[in-house]
Image: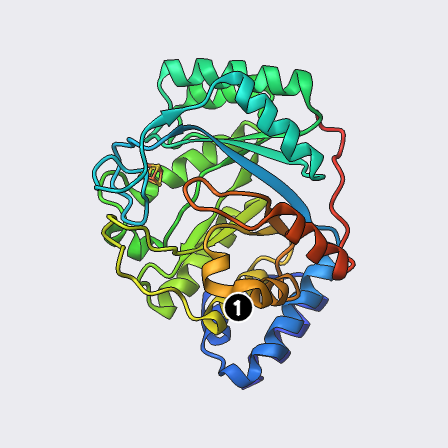
Amino acid sequence: MTDILLQARDQVLERGAGLDEAQVLEILRLPDERLDETLSLAHEVRMRWCGDTVEVEGIVSIKTGGCPEDCHFCSQSGRFETPVRAARLDIGSLVEAARETAATGATEFCIVAAVRGPDDRLMEQVGDAVAAIRDAVEINVACSLGILTEAQADELQAMGVHRYNHNLEAARSHFTSVVTTHTWEERRATLELVRERGMEVCCGCIVGMGETLEQRAELAAQLAEVDPHEVPMNFLDARPGTPFADMPPVEAADALRAIAAFRLAMPRTVLRFAGGRELTLGDLGARRGMLGGINAIIVGNYLTTLGRDPQDDLDLLGELSMPVKELQRTL
Ligand code: SF4
């Protein structure tokens, strides 16, 4: 049988066809001695099919905490005793956050709410916020507001929302061990609504929630099937008070292998370093990830955990000679 990295070189690098589930699993099972080789192939694939630019995004929470859902990794669920307190942000603060984000060179600004799905009041607030930001700041506005109805998807499109984030989070076969208050299929349906409205689909996951390697490969294949414009890759950062509080962090080598494998499954997607990378990979690992298939980052803080100083990330991109992607005039 041909070696999986040779297969991937021909199939993914030369022909641009992503690896399937069985092939991803082979990548995830490669020994540590082959990690450098794997990362370097994933990097070549990224450079060939996505180019050298890095997409920078900022995120801000319009409504934090108090969510009725029970996603076991999430400190914003109102069902768990976590230190996160419910809070809402006003429009002025959102515009200011968008302005600060744009000043880092970022092209995407994502407004996030901890909800099952938006109610009328939240839709109204988001509408006001999107209009105010688009008026004052040159940046694409994205939203992450949970499960949508058809009418809400229409409204977001009419507001000029450029991209919508809704993560699958976990493989379908693992989902009920992670969330019991809604289904994987409900998440998947929202992604279709978003795509049908012509908004860019951002659909990510969390690695390290007790899944097997087979389920990690399944997740990569299911994400590839969604064919998202962007995949934010999170690594579990176990939050106190949540059901996953005692889960150990993903080993750095496994995290890097997962990054490379996801890149080889999705050669053209924007693959973004999201939450948990500092814990799992540290500074050195961040560099290896950027040279192992990642082509987008979130600057500043995540929703409930602190990230690195934005300047550290921008300095790293400078050292790696990776230019920050400029805003295309889609506004
Ligand atoms: S991940 Fe989203 S839907 Fe799930 S508990 Fe957290 S905020 Fe609620």
Q: Which residue is mark 1?
A: 256
Nearest the eye: 3 or 319: 319
Residue 238, x across and y down, in percent? 33, 55
Q: Quadrant of ligand 1?
A: top left
Q: Residue at x 30, y 51 (%)?
A: 175
Residue 292 position (above or below residue 52): below
Q: How far across and down, in percent of the image, does residue 234 sit?
A: 46, 53
> Residue 12 at x, y = what percent?
64, 66
Q: Relative to the observer, which residue lies in front, 35 or 264?
A: 35
Residue 45, relative to residue 108: is it above or below? below
Nearest the camera: 16 or 323?
323
Residue found 46% across the figure and 63% down from its top: 280
The local crowd at label 1, few if under 14, some if 14 to 19, many if 20 or more residues have their Cα within 10 Å, is many
Image quadrant occupied by the C terminus: top right
Relative to 328, 294 lies left or right: left
Residue 26 visible in the shown view: yes
User: In the image, is 104 to the left or to the right of 191?
Assistant: right
Residue 20 makes an appearance in the image: no
Q: Position of residue 35 (x, y in %)?
A: 56, 78
Indicate yes or no: mark 1 CB to ligand 1 under 8 Å: no
The answer to which image quadrant residue 2 occupies is bottom right
- Number of disc labels: 1
Q: Residue at x 74, y 51 (%)?
A: 53
